[in-house]
């Protein structure tokens, strides 16, 4: 899978009417690698109802610090610029789907 380089600012990204699920991860993180499959399956199941974004904490240290990402993986859901949900650690796909369904 080829990764796209994002030029959108974080603030622009989270202003969306559509929920934005963000997976904070690191390439060296074992749990992050296994969680990536859950995120891909989630993305496939919800389609274009939700925007799914992966942010590498090593490449985005300032943003990770501002958002107080202390452990990875950390998942956040934003909508209209507001943090709607946050959890540290890998989450089951059912949890991700139920949190997003509350916002759609």
Image (cartoon, rainbow, N blue to C red):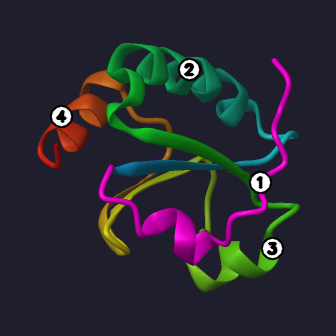
- Give the residue displayed 18% in from the left and 34% down from the top: 98
x then y, percent, for residue 80: 31, 69
Q: Label 2 crowding class (10 Å Cα cut-off): few <14, some 14-19, many 20+? A: few
Q: Label 3 belongs to which residue?
A: 61
Q: Label 3 crowding class (10 Å Cα cut-off): few <14, some 14-19, many 20+? A: few
In front: label 2 or label 1: 1
Q: Label 4 belongs to which residue?
A: 98
Q: Label 1 crowding class (10 Å Cα cut-off): few <14, some 14-19, many 20+? A: few
- The answer to whether marks 2 and 4 mark residues whose Cβ atoms lie closer than 8 Å is no
- The answer to whether marks 4 and 3 mark residues whose Cβ atoms lie closer than 8 Å is no
In front: label 1 or label 3: 1
Q: Mark 2 and mark 4: span between their CA atoms?
A: 16 Å
Ranked by sequence position, the earlier of labels 4 and 3 is: 3
Q: Is residue 77 magenta?
A: no
* Left-right relation of 54 to 84: right
- Give the residue displayed 55% in from the left and 77% down from the top: 11
Q: Label 4 crowding class (10 Å Cα cut-off): few <14, some 14-19, many 20+? A: few
Q: Label 1 belongs to which residue?
A: 6
Ranked by sequence position, the earlier of labels 2 and 3 is: 2
The relative height of residue 29 versus residue 15 in the rendered view (above or below) is above
- The answer to whether marks 2 and 1 mark residues whose Cβ atoms lie closer than 8 Å is no
Range drawn in magenta: 1-18
- The answer to whether marks 2 and 3 mark residues whose Cβ atoms lie closer than 8 Å is no
Q: Label 2 belongs to which residue?
A: 40
């Amino acid at each position: 899978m080829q990764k796209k380089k994002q030029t959108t600012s974080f603030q622009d990204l989270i202003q969306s009417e559509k929920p934005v699920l963000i997976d904070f991860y690191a390439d060296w993180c074992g749990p992050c690698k296994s969680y990536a499959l859950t995120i891909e399956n989630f993305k496939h199941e919800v389609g274009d109802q939700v925007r799914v974004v992966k942010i590498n904490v090593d490449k985005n240290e300032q943003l990770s610090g501002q958002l107080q990402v202390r452990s990875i993986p950390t998942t956040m859901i934003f909508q209209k610029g507001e943090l709607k949900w946050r959890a540290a650690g890998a989450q089951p796909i059912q949890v991700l789907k139920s949190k997003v369904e509350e916002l759609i």
